[in-house]
Amino acid sequence: MSSFSILVGKLVRAASRLRGGGSALPGLVVEKIDPDFIRRTLSTLPLGVAVVSGTNGKTTTTKMVVELLEGQGLKVFTNRTGSNFTRGVAAALIGEVNLRGRLDADIAVLELDEAHAVHFVKLIQPRYSLLLNVLRDQLDRFGEIDKTTRLLEQIALATTDTVVLNREDPRVASIAESLSGPQTVYFGLDASLRSTFPNDDEMRGSRSEAIAAAQPADVVLERVAEDEADFRLDDDITTTSLKLRGVYNIFNAAAALTFARQILGGRADRAALFESLANVQPAFGRGESLTVNGAPLELVLVKNPSGFRLGLKSFAAHGYATMIAVNDNYADGRDMSWLWDVDFETLSGGVDMVSGVRAYDMALRLKYDDVPVRDVDTDIPGALAKFIAGAGTQPMRIFCTYTAMLSVRRELSKITKVEVVS
């Protein structure tokens, strides 16, 4: 079955690409005809499987971990396009294995959606797992926020070697209490930065339990500047420049450094780790910068109050033409009431275009913060064309929910170079 299923998957993949862009369809096909494909393929890797999960930051953090490990000479398989369901992993594998099912890699580092990760770890137990945070953008998908925590806990319980946890998120940190087999390691923040990165309870005005703050962390983010940061490792502070945009990405860097150090163990070359980190480019939509008509255009993915708040804080509001596109499809979360938990006063100079299915909800929210809205158009292609034309040579920035981001990128791919994402 192995060679046949791989051949079928590769043919479906080729056909999908001829139709334009990537697709998880090959993975879905292979899963149906060969349910053991993922387990059989990944179980041969010398360093096993490393899983990254959580509400926010999976794509960027996974990208960083991969580049840190590759900088240490490892061959890494990953689901690079951020398709984080099991079928996405299967589709990525189809593109990498030969017809005999051999994968030329030392380790797999996989970004996995919380709910689908639970199914994945039943197929193959990860050797390492990194659990980032629990925030409210998953509520209408998974129910209560504590249910999301339990999903992450199941990933940790299936891990055989090391679980890396966010010390600053009390729900994530509490998972350590249920673990007896794997080693538990933390990443964290200096006390001076905790107000910059509030956890979900703090975003809602509640006080968090300080149970995790006393835990020692392998890597601590000490200071954040516009294009550099300080990290404390082994009681020494290292300052590094960064190409990543956004303060949220820099906290993700502490997570990635911790995870890479656990995977590498004593083989880790500290200087090489920071050299790799300094060269990581933003992932899809996470401060990604394109060029349109000779002017820079930045894409910023926003999924919940914390992410939107940090996105606004990370990028200067003045001197840019600004667009916001908000959809409420399943992948975005259907309940958009969280927009009322975001402070938009930094956009007091005005928003040039608001678009997407929930454009008028977004425009109303901006009105309550006295933010002028110059145009509203629910049709994203039309709105984007007007926005670009109106911006002229001015730098542009677009804040988007997930499916709005896909629509925007699809339109932009017609006029500029945009990486294809499944």
Image: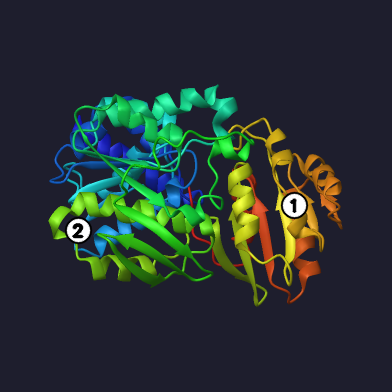
Question: Where does label 2 land, which residue?
Answer: 74
| Residue at the image point whose x is 44% and y is 38% from the top | 54
| On screen, residue 337 above or below 396 | above
> Can you say which quadrant of the picture contains the N terminus?
top left
Rendered location of residue 245, percent (x, y) = 52, 64
Nearer the N terminus, badge 1 or badge 2? 2
Q: Which amino acid type is shown beneath numbered disc 2?
A: Leu
Question: Where does label 1 land, which residue?
Answer: 344
| On screen, residue 250 above or below 55 | below
The answer to which image quadrant residue 236 occupies is bottom left
> Is 366 positioned to the left or the right of 300 in the image?
right
Number of numbered discs present?
A: 2
Q: What label does residue 191 carry, if any?
A: none
| Render colour scheme | rainbow
The answer to whether residue 35 of the structure is visible from this angle is no
Rendered location of residue 307, percent (x, y) = 58, 48
> Is 6 positioned to the left or the right of 308 in the image?
left
| Residue at the image point whose x is 38% and y is 44% from the top | 13
Rendered location of residue 330, percent (x, y) = 60, 32
